[in-house]
Amino acid sequence: MSDAAVGIIGGSGLYAMEGLTVLYERNIETPFGEPSDAFIIGEMDGTRVAFLARHGRGHRKTPSEVNYRANIFAMKLLGVHTILSASAVGSMKEDYHPTDIVFPHQFIDRTRHRADTFFSNGIVGHISFADPICAGVSFLMGDAARTAGAKVHMGGVYVCMEGPQFSTRAESSLYRSWGVDVIGMTNLTEARLAREAELCYATMALVTDYDCWHPEHDAVDVEQVLGYLRANATMAQTVLRTSLTKAATRKRDCACVNALQFAIMTHPDLIPPKVKDDLAPLIGKYIK
């Protein structure tokens, strides 16, 4: 029996889930090291959930220091099939205001210093990533947000920067010229790895600022981000809670389910035995 069918990854300002009945905590060992923190296994409205604070409780890890591979691999080991993510983002458009919620469906990668694939050290895999978000889960969360009264923007492009510094004005202007909708530091890496692990993944992007491009608003700072996250914390938790049971029980008829079916290039006989053993939770149904 799995620990939970749905995992929640909480970002800046979301380090716990109100209304979650905690059953136990689990420290998970993975071939890729330790996850950001212990997983809180709990129950909410009759549905099991595995909650993880992306940056660790107390926000101890920068976006570059987060061990994304360990986080996602551990979710797989726990039996999770769907991940609901929440994170703070900056708005790159005039009409996307602080406390609005965006459900992006596309990404642009501006990261430089992080491991973002399970396939290396003797095994090569190329997943299809044209549509990086599980649309079914994203629309489910978007409906929950609208029902709760949030101002919702469905779809759009999230540019994922390395951080931990915020953008320069030149960078912010460049990204706006690309037509992106929001900017953040974490979600693309999670989405890549979730697809490699054949997990459904969608993110709820909570707008906290205008980066530094807006002439009528000060450049983003941590105090501003946390202030808007506190203002929107109740809404964010309501959306996650409302989405949880539906995400756990939905029919997974999406491409996420068999993302690795034709992705592994390396001949099975040439994959190092340890790598094959380490990746068995991911590739075991295709390669023995």
Image: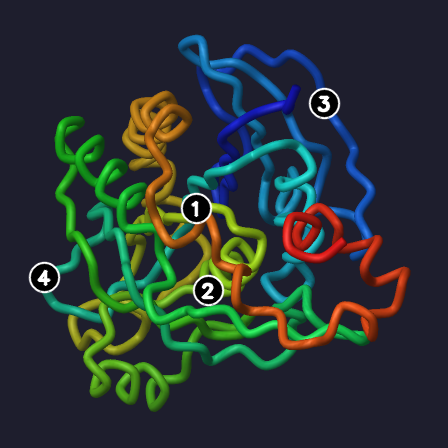
Q: Quadrant of the N terminus?
A: top right
Residue bearing mark 3: 25
Q: Residue at x 63, y 57 (%)?
A: 68
Residue bearing mark 2: 188
Say which mark, if any, is on residue 95: 4
- Disc 3 versus disc 1: nearer the observer: 1
Q: Amino acid at mark 4?
A: Asp
Disc 2 crowd rating (10 Å Cα; few below 14, some 14-19, many 20+) is many
**Disc on the earlier residue, 3 or 1:** 3
Q: Amino acid at mark 3?
A: Glu
Q: Nearer the viewer, residue 114 or 234?
A: 114
Residue bearing mark 1: 200
Percent across and percent down for residue 254 are 34, 48
Q: Is residue 30 left or right of residue 141?
A: right
Q: Amino acid at mark 2?
A: Leu
With respect to residue 44, does 176 lie above or below? below
Secondary structure at numbered mark 2: helix
The part of the image, by quadrant, that contains residue 122 is bottom right
Percent across and percent down for residue 238 are 31, 25
Percent across and percent down for residue 152 are 15, 46
**Disc on the earlier residue, 3 or 2:** 3
Q: Is residue 94 left or right of residue 272?
A: left
Q: Amino acid at mark 1?
A: Cys
Q: CA distance from mark 1 to mark 4?
A: 29 Å
Q: Nearer the viewer, residue 77 or 92?
A: 77
Secondary structure at numbered mark 4: loop
